[in-house]
């Protein structure tokens, strides 16, 4: 009896792959634009488990000079520091379905392959953003002088995000507050900010919000995403405290998500079963680069590892040169 082989079945890898590429690129463009360049998706082939970059560690080298002094001067030595970014290895699937499922939907395999690719593309893009923001929250939680924490304020209203709190957070950057190019926050925090401005009736703002749909954010664009990295429903781990939100004020290129290896997507047909099966599996790698921070953890970290503050070292001595600042607050609905 003749046996069917893979060559006898049409496999639509190209349509599936095209669907993923289309959605990922659209999402990447949207995030890059909405974050004003603070959060970036890029593609760059990187070997090994880590991306390593070095830079000169220069102390202040400008001092007073006496034009009449001819004594010897001791030179200051130059040293280099290293920035290490971890590569995260990820798998897609495997997913399995019968060929009969596609036929019953009344769609061609080509169309279904493209639609499934689009769905998976959206999930990939969201997952990349979540991983990048997880690293950002971990780094800004650790670095000294980068946090404004209002969760301990006496009045409940003062524990929630406000224009005043955002301004105080920007103030952590001192005379370099203009380096912050965008806010990134959870939708619950953005809702609290908008509602607070309506209730407080800030001069001109409440009318603009009610009729123009614009929430004041100190002149900076706001990237709103419901990433788990920006919201903790149980920060104490014992249900005793209200939910916390983490608002990131990021500088240019603060977080860079690099697809650092060629993405592999394989769609295969399995015969010899009661029904013909289609099985899909893929592999990819994402390198997360944090501005001014070096990763000290083990190779191939998972989400929990890059979200652990102790796995990151702040390399820049001045926070004004780093990824930005963070506001830690409560959410109004949990108070």
Image (cartoon, grey):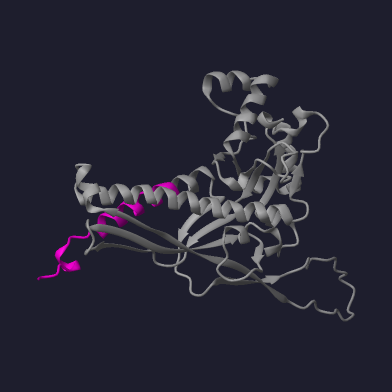
Q: Is residue 115 left or right of residue 87?
A: left
322 or 74: nearer the viewer: 322
Above or below, 211 against 55 in this view is above
Residue in view at x 31 percent, y 59 percent: 279
Above or below, 40 against 73 in this view is above
Q: Is residue 54 left or right of residue 68?
A: left
Asked whether residue 253 is in view, the answer is: no
The residue sitting at the left extreme is 1
The magenta stretch spans residue 66: no
Residue in view at x 33 percent, y 59 percent: 280
219 or 38: nearer the viewer: 38
Residue in view at x 77 percent, y 68 percent: 59
Q: Is residue 108 left or right of residue 321?
A: left
**Residue 90 placement (x, y as % from top left):** 47, 62
Q: Quadrant of residue 67?
A: bottom right
Q: Which residues are magenta?
A: 1-28
Above or below, 54 against 24 in this view is below
């Amino acid at each position: 009896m003749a046996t069917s082989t893979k060559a006898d079945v049409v496999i639509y890898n190209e349509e599936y792959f095209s669907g993923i590429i289309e959605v990922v690129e659209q999402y990447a463009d949207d995030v890059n634009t909405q974050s004003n360049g603070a959060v970036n998706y890029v593609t760059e082939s990187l070997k090994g488990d880590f991306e390593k970059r070095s830079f000169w560690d220069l102390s202040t080298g400008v001092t007073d000079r006496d034009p009449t002094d001819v004594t010897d001067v001791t030179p200051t030595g130059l040293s280099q520091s290293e920035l290490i970014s971890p590569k995260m290895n990820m798998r897609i699937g495997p997913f399995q379905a019968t060929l009969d499922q596609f036929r019953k939907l009344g769609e061609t395999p080509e169309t279904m392959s493209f639609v499934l690719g689009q769905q998976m593309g959206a999930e990939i893009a969201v997952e990349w953003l979540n991983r990048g923001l997880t690293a950002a929250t971990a780094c800004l939680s650790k670095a000294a002088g980068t946090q404004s924490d209002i969760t301990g304020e006496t009045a409940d209203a003062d524990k929630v995000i406000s224009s005043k709190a955002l301004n105080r957070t920007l103030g952590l950057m001192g005379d370099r507050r203009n380096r912050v190019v965008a806010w990134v926050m959870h939708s619950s925090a953005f809702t609290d900010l908008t509602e607070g401005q309506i209730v407080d009736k800030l001069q001109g703002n409440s009318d603009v919000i009610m009729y123009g749909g614009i929430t004041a954010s100190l002149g900076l664009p706001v990237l709103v995403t419901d990433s788990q990295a920006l919201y903790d429903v149980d920060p104490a781990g014992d249900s005793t405290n209200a939910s916390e939100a983490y608002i990131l004020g990021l500088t240019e290129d603060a977080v860079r998500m690099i697809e650092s290896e060629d993405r592999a997507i394989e769609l295969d047909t399995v015969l010899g079963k009661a029904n013909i099966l289609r099985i899909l599996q893929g592999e990819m790698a994402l390198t997360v680069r944090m501005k001014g921070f070096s990763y000290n953890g083990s190779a191939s970290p998972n989400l929990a590892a890059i979200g652990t503050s102790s796995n990151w070292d702040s390399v820049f001595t001045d926070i004004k040169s780093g990824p930005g600042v963070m506001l830690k607050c409560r959410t109004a609905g949990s108070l």
